[in-house]
Image: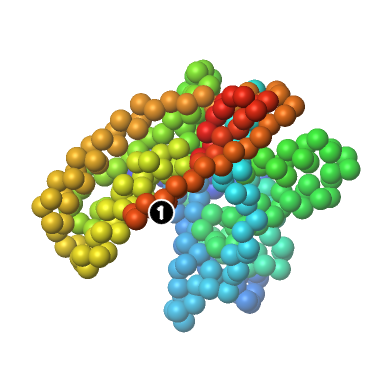
Amino acid sequence: MQDPNLRSQYVKLMHEYLNLGHMRELSPEDIDKKPNFYLPHHPVITQKLRKVFDGSFKDSNGNSLNDPLHIGPSILRKLVSICIRFRMFKFVFSADIVKMYRQILVAAKHCSYQRFVWRDDECSPIKHYEQSTATYGTSSAPFLAVRVLDQLVHDHQHEFPTAAKVVKEESEATLTSEGKGFHSTAKVLGIHWDPKQDTLSFKVCLSSNPKNYKRQVLSDVARIFDPLGVLSPVVVQFKILFQELWLLDLGWDTELPPKIAEWWNKRRKDLNALQELRMQRFIDNKENHIELHGFSDSSIKAYSACGGWVLHGCKIKKNSR
């Protein structure tokens, strides 16, 4: 590694893995045991330093570890349901499962497929290791992480019924901090939450030097993440534009027609205003009688639907979609 500070952090992380039993050094006798697979690894810094394997790396025979692995069925709850539940409680807090992937032990007979080499510095001999836990970079790890939680709920729900219900129903609504201290912004599945004001907002991260290509329009639409559909009146304009571009049979990297390019760039600048949008997180739901009313409409270009909670049949408190 060219960065001495990064190398120092990575060496420290490797020692932590060893001390916690999350990886083990192989003896000379173990090295030659078959079958096995060696994976390249590298550091990735998000909110903290992580070790990531390249499970898609192909060996000399053209095979990768991810090729035979199943990604597993999706057992995540629907994002809309999770986000709505997050708004139904007056008080909310975040919690984190420390080293979540590294809490999942891999069967000993399978650890040989998670081998790698490492040395602390260039003067030290290269050593062989096996990863003992689930890890980033393998296709099955995301499924295993959630599946293990479900199994824990099943095995221990009779001991901790309240905790089991929370883990089962709310565990996917993870909060990731983006600052320090209680008044920082947190992110709830893509929606930004201000704990101090208890409001939700959106951040639109568009590229700073766009090109007037169809590929850029698709990229911009994909960057607007809105699981609750609050931004649908804005997003639908971009989707309609994208439909028009398909009808024009433009290539992915073909310049947009001048009038369309002018409209797109103007609307694109307006997206910054979305970052000023704020809505209350908590939806007061004390009443015993709640009705859900739905509305829909369509035109030649698009159709939409929305719903609202009606309390005691007299007052619409909050639109949900």
| Residue at 24% from the left image edge and 41% from the top image edge | 268
Quadrant assignment, res 142: bottom right
* Residue annotated with mark 1: 122
- Residue 262 percent across, percent down from the top left: 14, 46
Is residue 66 among what the camera can see?
yes
Q: Is residue 106 above or below residue 283?
A: below
Residue 47 appears in view:
no
Residue, x 50% and y 64% (percent of image)? 55
* Residue with the most extreme left position: 258
Q: Identify which residue is drawn at 47% across, 57% down.
A: 41
Horizontal arrangement in the rendering, residue 72 relative to residue 215 (left or right): right
User: At x 31% / y 47%, what residue is drawn?
Assistant: 237
In the current view of this chain or complex, which residue is farthest to the bottom?
61
Secondary structure state at the residue bearing disc 1: loop
Q: Which amino acid does label 1 sit on?
A: Glu
Tell me residue 163's x, y (percent): 78, 36
Of residue 264 and residue 102, the one placed in the foreground of this image is: 264
Q: How crowded is mark 1: few (under 14 residues within 10 Å), some or many (20 or more)?
A: few
Q: Name the spot of residue 36 as percent of width and height, x first.
A: 60, 73
Q: In this view, does 41 lie above or below 187?
A: below
Q: In this view, does 305 lie above or below 32?
A: above
Residue 20 relative to residue 319: left or right: right
Viewer-side residue, 121 vs 241? 241
State which quadrant residue 114 falls in.
bottom right
